[in-house]
Amino acid sequence: MLSILILTFVFSCKSLEKNGNENKPLTTYPPVETGEANTDYKPAFEGQTRAPGLKTTTPFEVKVKAEGLARPWGITPLPDGRLLITEKAGNMLIATTEGQLSGKITGFPAINSGGQGGLQGLALAPDFKTSRIIYFAFSENNPDATVGGSVAAIAKGKLSADETKIEQVQVIYRALPYWKSTGHYGGRMIFDKEGNIFYISGERSNVEARVKAQDLDNTFGKVVHITPEGKPVPNGPFAKTPGAFPEIYSFGHRNPLGVDFHPVTGDLWVVEMGPRGGDELNLIKPGKNYGWSAVTYGIEYSGATIEGGITQRDDVEQPVYYWDPVVSPGGMTFYRSSEIPEWKNSLFVAGLSSKHIARLVIRDNKVVGEERIMEDQGQRVRDVTELNGVLFAITDEGRLYRIGKK
Ligand SMILES: [Ca+2]
């Protein structure tokens, strides 16, 4: 009997550890979303949408630290405790956590910043402290103007010693083919533990392009896995599939804009902007199909169903969570600190049209609670990152926010 009790105790501790759960049961409220849904589609399982509401009990404050940023797009901490920010038109700058802004860092390649394009996501090389190498995503015109179109590209460059320029810029990857659209580039990336890159690629938005998310002979609507030199990571799930791009890791995505690893499980999570009523949070597994544009909880902006209005199919992964109405997710980050203990391992998702940050509590790979942060600010939140237990968010309106303990 005692051994069973001990075993049970050990297993429950293991389970808590594995799932990153805090010990306390959650105090929940009605779902934060009270608006009418766009569709009458039914979720595949309980809690896949409109999870119970949450309220953070630890006192925290939301403070504007800087204004006047020009369409900031990506934000990431530097090792010295400052923040590196991209601006859509094609430059970076550095902010202190008190909101003091550097001059514009220049030297980037020619960028097509029309539509949804521009200088987008960024990631520091794992050896940034010594190499000063930064990776960045941007939309690039086809050098062959007779063909035209643009492509989502990834380049690397070295931050100059005086922090005014990016030097030795080298384009390492292009999410081919070039396409005549300035929408849905995707645009963020993250380094994995082995030093390779996961890049989340959009499906370029128009009807002729989006169906390509289901095909493996292109990188539209894909999570791709590449080396720091931009080559496919060997032995990918489609490395031996004839005609497939070997860097494809998962497919069937629409416009993925947020990516992070779960702090405890190490799993790769991605949030993608859906059509009307179909934003998704997905747990990414190699070789899997995430459905778009054949399977979706969303509908066309016109209100028409998309490709027969199918929400479930045996060969398609279900989203862990979806939003209807949409939040229009931008960047996202898991909270790794213990500074605000109830936030540890929560996922924070920037909301553009929803104008808030969604805090999601995830247990056993399911969303068990949702809270809205900074809803009263009325800002389109583009990206959010965590630094030493404090969240920093950038908005389309040009603000840098600090969200943390008083
Ligand atoms: Ca999907």
Image (tube, grey):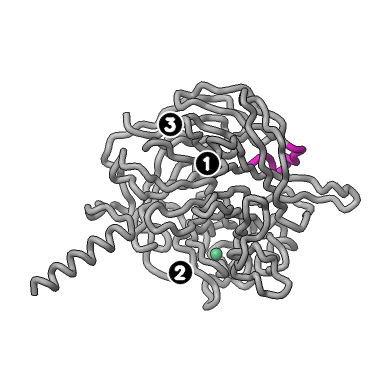
Where residue 70 appears, x then y in whole percent?
62, 30
The amino acid type of the residue labelled 3 equals Arg
Q: Which residue is mark 1?
A: 383
Mark 1 C-beta closer than 8 Å to ligand 1: no
Residue 353 percent coordinates (x, y): 54, 45
Q: Quick check: is the Cβ at mark 2 less than 8 Å away from ligand 1? A: no
Residue picked out by circle 2: 42
Q: Which residue lies most toward the left here?
A: 1
| Gap between marks 1 and 2 measured at Cα | 30 Å
- Looking at the rendered structure, the kind of residue marked 2 is Lys
Q: Where does ligand 1 appear, by image quarter?
A: bottom right
Does any atom of ligand 1 lie closer than 8 Å to the CB of label 3?
no
Crowding at dot 1, Cα within 10 Å, few <14 / some 14-19 / many 20+, comes out as many
The residues colored magenta run: 109-120
Instruction: Determine if residue 337 is in view.
Output: yes
Front in this rendered view, residue 91 or 229:
229
Q: Who comes first in sequence, dot 1 or dot 2?
A: 2
